[in-house]
Image: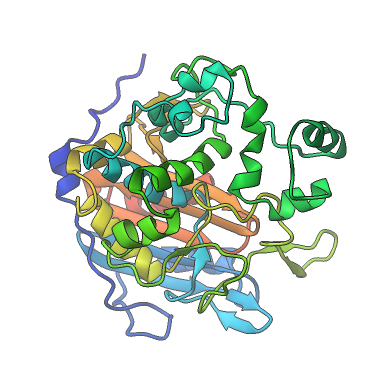
Amino acid sequence: MKLFRTIILPATIAALAWAALSCSSDTGSRAIPPCEITTPLDSLFSTMFRPDEPGAIVGVVRNDSIVYLRGFGKASLAPSRPMTDSTMLNVCSITKTFVVAAVTKLAEAGKLSLDDSVAEYFPQFEGHCFKEVKLRHILSHTTGLPDLRPRNPDQWDTYVKRHNSTFGEGSDYLLYGREEELIRFYESVDSLLHNPGEGFHYQEPPFMLLSYVISQAAGMPFDQYMTDSIFSAAGLRNTAFFDPDTEFPNEAHGYAPVEGQPGKWAEYDYGEAEFFPTRADRGLYTTAADFIKWQKAFYGGKLISPENVARTIAWQTGTRLPNIGYGYGIFVENKPEMPYKAFHMSSNGGFSVFESVIPEARIFYFVLSNRPDWSRLATGHKIDAVLRSKDWI
């Protein structure tokens, strides 16, 4: 049996305070002075993201300083706009950490408990199993709830026989369904894949439930609570949940390569990508500038207590990947030869992301991209290799 490092202590988390954004590299602002990781990271990402294609914004923060921040490629192909630190991108499942912060903040205020059952908030779910599923199980993806959203015509025909739908066709359901529609299948769920807390299944619909939990506990709409108590508290000015009727300033589009047509790209977000427009599971848009501020506020204990921050990135359950587990809303990696780290690897339509926090080394890095054709986990390991080669970790 492998022996792993002790999980990060609250005092260690409290010591992490990332610097506020003051400059940027190749983004139209003042340049960050080059350092020993600049050349290898430039080489890695300029190869991955060509100037005339959809791209990414890449950042590294070390010891309270932004040491690398560079945009690669395009945020939009038509009209053509470069990727910068002010580009608003969908951050996919990084959204979950923001929602975990909101649920935890409400728990600290006594407005809810992580041991509340799902049944307390959703009386329309008649299955007895919902009394067994607690909010903490949602945060750790250990609910055991199945994902029975219809994905093909046969499943759609079965679904509409049992549930009301605002959509006349399954294709519209897949492209335009919001939380209210996409959690309705739970009304007929009466059994679990496993007992709550006894297995890990990464599922999006349980996290969708949290937008309604937060709204009920806070006594206000979900978006309002998130804006007032999370985004504003962290100093975020360009962060919001996806709204099909709102176009964000400097908004990136997601893209996917066109099969059989090298060099061609097709827009792949709202209206093209299945299950794209939901909120609490992966619907957040933000900029690199705001994202760095978010990390400073969250890991600095400005939003929830240092003890609860530590609990968020503590190993709650294992996954099928070696040395990788899951905390609350975030993956964790505990390799004997590496510092303990928390990370996200996710995609939503054409958007894809990787972020990593390594508390012991006081390092945070991220890749926020509007194309899905790159390996998130492998890229994270390549960044780790660069950092290790310079004795940063």
Q: Nearer the viewer, residue 238 or 295?
A: 238
Expressed as whole percent of the image width and height from the top left, the position of residue 110 reads: 23, 38
Residue 382 visible in rendering = no
Residue at 67% x, 62% y is 270
The coloring applied to the image is rainbow
Residue 356 visible in rendering = yes
Indicate whether 82 appears above or below 317: below
Expressed as whole percent of the image width and height from the top left, the position of residue 255 reads: 67, 65
Q: Is residue 41 left or right of residue 234?
A: right
Residue at 73% x, 54% y is 175
Expressed as whole percent of the image width and height from the top left, the position of residue 264 reads: 77, 70
Q: Quadrant of residue 24?
A: bottom left
Q: Nearer the viewer, residue 325 or 119?
A: 119
Q: Looking at the image, how many numbered discs can be counted on the residues?
A: 0
Indicate whether 228 appears above or below 162: below
Indicate whether 267 appears above or below 204: below
Q: Is residue 195 left or right of residue 262?
A: left
> The N terminus lies in which quarter of the figure?
top left
Q: Nearer the viewer, residue 44 or 156?
A: 156
Expressed as whole percent of the image width and height from the top left, the position of residue 145 reads: 57, 25
Q: Nearer the viewer, residue 387 or 287?
A: 287
Residue at 17% x, 35% y is 9
Residue at 82% x, 59% y is 259
